Image (cartoon, grey):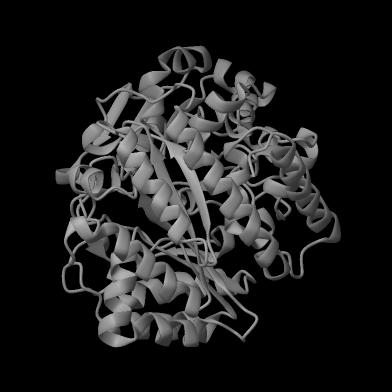
């Protein structure tokens, strides 16, 4: 069979080119090194290969790559996302290779923490380096292939310039590239010189009307409903982007793209799902109910990426909205939905200093009670928060960690996971110091408390989460959990 020729090939390593068995949070396993099992087993669980067509195009691909693919296709450029195992047949003819990643060199959270604690390189970094060393990429580069890299982790190339030189990366594009990438790629195709670095700032960020609709399915049916965040947390880069909401008709069109490709699930994505159609930081029921009814009309499984805890509290207290939304999207009494949330700290003082609007519309000093009330609401609505904590925030004091420990203890009765992560300088704090040291006594106690909490609730949740999984994957996950539990007891961490 003769291959179709693509001028632009978009790809990434296996840690991201995967649907993670339809369980988005399994992908977080790729942010760490293998724990007590062989790397091949670890990767089989975290990032299995995806189905591809006869040309090596994946059925599902990362949403960011799908957006870039759509922008190039809309501009009349022959482009396609290609699975990393099928690059060779296309790079013989392609003139541009575009790569996007969430954590190229494992510098982001929680990868950086696992690296410090274990002394071992996380698999996301290892697999990306192997990807860039592929003979087919090296050979194509010698013949003039242009390499453009971007995505949420584009900033990491500024910390690792030696790799850009080693692999012949022509341009790093940082920021929302949906619009800017077209002219950049066209220049590459026309043989014009490319800039080493392009920054798409707030003033250049595309309006929603300028953002293309995906043409092919995204991983686990992820569809973006909003960009940016109004909360202004000083450690987060998303807050540097203007807040824009995607109209319902655009959201539904992308949902239908995923449905047409055979997906039976969708994942609604924004930094705070509950702020879709909101009045500032106050959720409103009408747009959220309509959004979820549309998603549920097309898909059996509807998931969330992120919500804020203050929005959970406000939505339920004022409109019983969490209860109403869970009734729309949950399929039965044995069903749950998982979602990422940010606790970050249990200290009201540190919360007020580093994330003063995280609690809004409530005062920052009430942050611990907001967290507890939101967890209670989600527990009753069968919503499982996967919560992050940040260790090593600027100006963190032992007494702040004591407050965090007290909060973890108050959350023990609520179905949830709590994941501690090291501070990484991003957002307003991007020029700050990295936290790359062994944990202090208080930080270690926080980590132990999180481990005890998580192992308890993992046992409770495993029946739901492992339901309908491949028996080998289910057995592998249960084995990892068992080994972690045994080792933690042996080390007297529990």
Q: Kindly identify the residue that appears in the image at 62 percent across and 86 percent down.
A: 333
User: Residue 403: percent from the left, percent from the top?
Assistant: 34, 47
Above or below residue 457? Residue 284 is: below
Q: Name the image quarter holding residue 20.
A: bottom right
Q: In front here: 420 or 474?
A: 420
Q: Kindly identify the residue that appears in the image at 53 percent across and 76 percent down.
A: 382
Q: In front here: 118 or 159?
A: 118
Q: Can residue 7 be seen from the camera position used here?
A: no
Total labels drawn: 0
- Is residue 291 left or right of 258 when viewed as pictured? left
User: Residue 157: percent from the left, percent from the top?
Assistant: 40, 24
- Is residue 313 left or right of 480 when viewed as pictured? left
Above or below residue 171? Residue 387 is: below
User: Residue 395: percent from the left, percent from the top?
Assistant: 24, 31
Q: Name the image quarter holding residue 143.
A: top right
Q: Can residue 434 be seen from the camera position used here?
A: yes
Q: Name the image quarter holding residue 85.
A: top right
- Is residue 142 left or right of 328 when viewed as pictured? right
Above or below residue 491? Residue 83 is: below
Q: Kindly identify the residue that appears in the image at 21 percent across and 36 percent down.
A: 428
């Amino acid at each position: 069979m003769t291959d179709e020729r693509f001028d632009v090939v978009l790809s990434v390593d296996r840690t991201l080119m995967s649907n993670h068995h339809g369980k988005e949070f399994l992908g977080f396993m790729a942010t760490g090194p293998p724990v007590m099992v062989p790397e091949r087993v670890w990767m089989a669980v975290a990032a299995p290969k995806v189905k591809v067509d006869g040309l090596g195009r994946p059925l599902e691909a990362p949403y960011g790559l799908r957006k870039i693919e759509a922008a190039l296709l809309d501009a009349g450029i022959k482009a396609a996302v290609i699975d990393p195992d099928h690059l060779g047949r296309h790079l013989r003819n392609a003139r541009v290779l575009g790569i996007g990643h969430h954590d190229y060199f494992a510098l982001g959270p929680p990868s950086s923490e696992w690296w410090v604690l274990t002394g071992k390189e996380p698999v996301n970094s290892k697999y990306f380096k192997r990807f860039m060393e592929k003979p087919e990429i090296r050979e194509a580069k010698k013949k003039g292939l242009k390499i453009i890299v971007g995505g949420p982790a584009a900033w990491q190339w500024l910390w690792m310039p030696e790799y850009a030189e080693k692999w012949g990366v022509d341009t790093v594009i940082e920021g929302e590239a949906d619009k800017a990438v077209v002219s950049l790629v066209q220049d590459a195709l026309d043989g014009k010189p490319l800039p080493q670095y392009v920054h798409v700032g707030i003033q250049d960020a595309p309006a929603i009307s300028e953002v293309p609709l995906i043409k092919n399915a995204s991983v686990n049916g992820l569809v973006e409903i909003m960009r940016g965040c109004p909360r202004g947390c000083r450690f987060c880069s998303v807050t540097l982007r203007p807040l824009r909401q995607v109209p319902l008709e655009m959201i539904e069109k992308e949902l239908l793209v995923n449905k047409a490709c055979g997906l039976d699930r969708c994942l609604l994505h924004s930094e705070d799902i509950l702020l879709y159609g909101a009045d500032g930081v106050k959720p409103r029921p009408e747009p959220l109910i309509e959004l979820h009814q549309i998603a549920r009309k097309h898909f059996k499984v509807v998931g969330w990426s992120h919500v804020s805890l203050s929005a959970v509290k406000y939505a339920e207290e004022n409109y019983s909205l969490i209860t109403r939304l869970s009734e729309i999207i949950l399929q039965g009494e044995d069903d749950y939905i998982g979602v990422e949330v940010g606790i970050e700290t249990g200290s009201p003082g540190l919360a007020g200093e580093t994330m003063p609007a995280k609690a809004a519309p409530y005062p920052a000093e009430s942050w611990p009670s907001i967290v507890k009330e939101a967890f209670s609401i989600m527990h009753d609505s069968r919503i499982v928060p996967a919560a992050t904590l940040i260790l090593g925030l600027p100006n963190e004091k032992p007494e702040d960690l004591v407050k965090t420990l007290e909060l973890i203890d108050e959350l023990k009765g609520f179905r949830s996971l709590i994941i501690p992560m090291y501070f990484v300088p991003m957002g307003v704090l991007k020029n700050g110091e990295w936290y790359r040291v062994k944990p202090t006594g208080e930080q270690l106690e926080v980590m132990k408390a999180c481990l005890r909490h998580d192992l308890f609730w993992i046992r409770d949740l495993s029946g739901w989460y492992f339901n309908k999984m491949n028996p080998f994957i289910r057995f592998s996950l249960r084995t990892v959990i068992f080994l972690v539990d045994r080792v933690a007891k042996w080390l007297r961490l529990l």
